[in-house]
Amino acid sequence: MSLRDTTYSELSRATATGDACASFAMDEESFRTFYERTARCVWAYLARITGDRHLADDLLQESYYRFLRAGASYESEAHRRNSLYRIATNLARDARRRSAARGLAEEGVEHVPGGDDAARAERVADVTRALAQLKLREREMLWLAYAEGASHEEIAATLGLRPASLKALLFRARRRLSALLSPRERADSDAGA
Amino acid sequence: MPERECHFESEVLAAVVEGRWPRAVEPSLREHAAACPLCSEVLTVASALAPDRQELKAAPSLPAAGTVWWRAQIRARREAAAAAARPLLVAQAAGFVVALAILGMVGKSLLPSFTLLAGEYGGWFFAAAAAVLVIPAAILLALRRSE
């Protein structure tokens, strides 16, 4: 059963009676704050590594549920955030295995930039195409490192890798993506400079 | 073995992620990035992914925090209830088996000719008993699963 199976009538009844009181390690107020701070970043991460925004919607809610159910205590906000990303990563990997078993192809994230910015739309399409050619783990590493700006230690903890091996893996993944992006990105950055 | 790290990588990356590249950085860093193959790669990759992240973050309408919280509460409660009911179901099944055994023993002691009857009608008797016990139990299980 997924979180989406919960009906709105159940939600409103539970809210009205206040009888839904499962014991999570986090209280509602702390959860709201944490969710507001992290949800969009986690969604963007899931959308990019899975290449499917609908799947990202489902995985996002499942990630927060599992995070709450884990009931762990965290020494810092960063530690809590890393734990959430780790859960999200594992869910994305499971989903990938399931879709591979069913023989489904990745769609690519088809987010359309607003306005009439055709160059921006083209850049998004290029990034989507380039990322689709990488392995899931490469996408995870690159997103965390170069979109989120996470440290090597954080990435290693999130992806379950040894920090020593991460450097080499990240270097290779970056080289691949750079080669896939190079003609357009170089032209863009030269124009920007 | 090729060089895998440049000391300026983190500076270049921070400038791109924070939106300072290229205007709000030192010209010397820009010149270095243009000449250094490693920083150039960082620049290419970060310049593609960091703005992409900003656009994706702005795109979706995500469920409200309160909705996610209450859905999680309800789901946790349902799962707890299902987990609590599981031993009860096992106990019910065991109860059926024990009741059947007792019924058999009582029947055997009460009917001297049980062996004779069982020999003649035993197959039918057990088939009927199984139908009476197993079919309702299967329906009950199916109903509980669908809840």
Image (tube, rainbow, N blue to C red):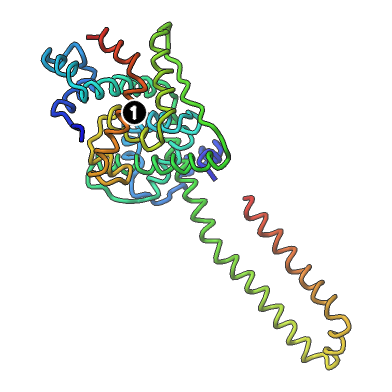
| Image x and y of residue A146, in percent | 28, 28
- The correct choice, above or below, for A43 with respect to A70 in the image is above
Of A46 and A57, nearer the camera is A46
Q: Chain of mark 1?
A: A
Which residue is the extreme one toward the bottom?
B112
User: Which type of secondary structure does the marked residue at label 1 adopt?
Assistant: helix
- The correct choice, above or below, for B92 with respect to B72 in the image is below
Q: Residue at x 51, y 27 (%)?
A: A107
Q: Residue at x 70, y 81 (%)?
A: B101
Q: Residue at x 27, y 40 (%)?
A: A166
| Image x and y of residue A115, in percent | 42, 8
- The correct choice, above or below, for A165 with respect to B65 in the image is below
Q: Quadrant of residue B91?
A: bottom right
Q: Residue at x 57, y 66 (%)?
A: B88
**Residue tagged 1:** A176
| Image x and y of residue B98, in percent | 66, 78
Q: Quadrant of residue B32?
A: top left
**In this image, A111 relative to B118: left or right?**
left
> How busy is the neighbourhood of tag 1: few (under 14 within 10 Å), some, or many (20 plus)?
some
For the C terminus of chain A, which image quadrant? top left
**In this image, A184 relative to A10: left or right?**
left
| Image x and y of residue B2, in percent | 20, 32
Q: Quadrant of residue A121?
A: top left
Which residue is the extreme one toward the front?
B1
**Residue type, label 1:** Arg
Of B113 and B13, nearer the camera is B13
Which residue is the extreme one toward the right?
B120
Looking at the image, how many numbered discs can be counted on the residues?
1
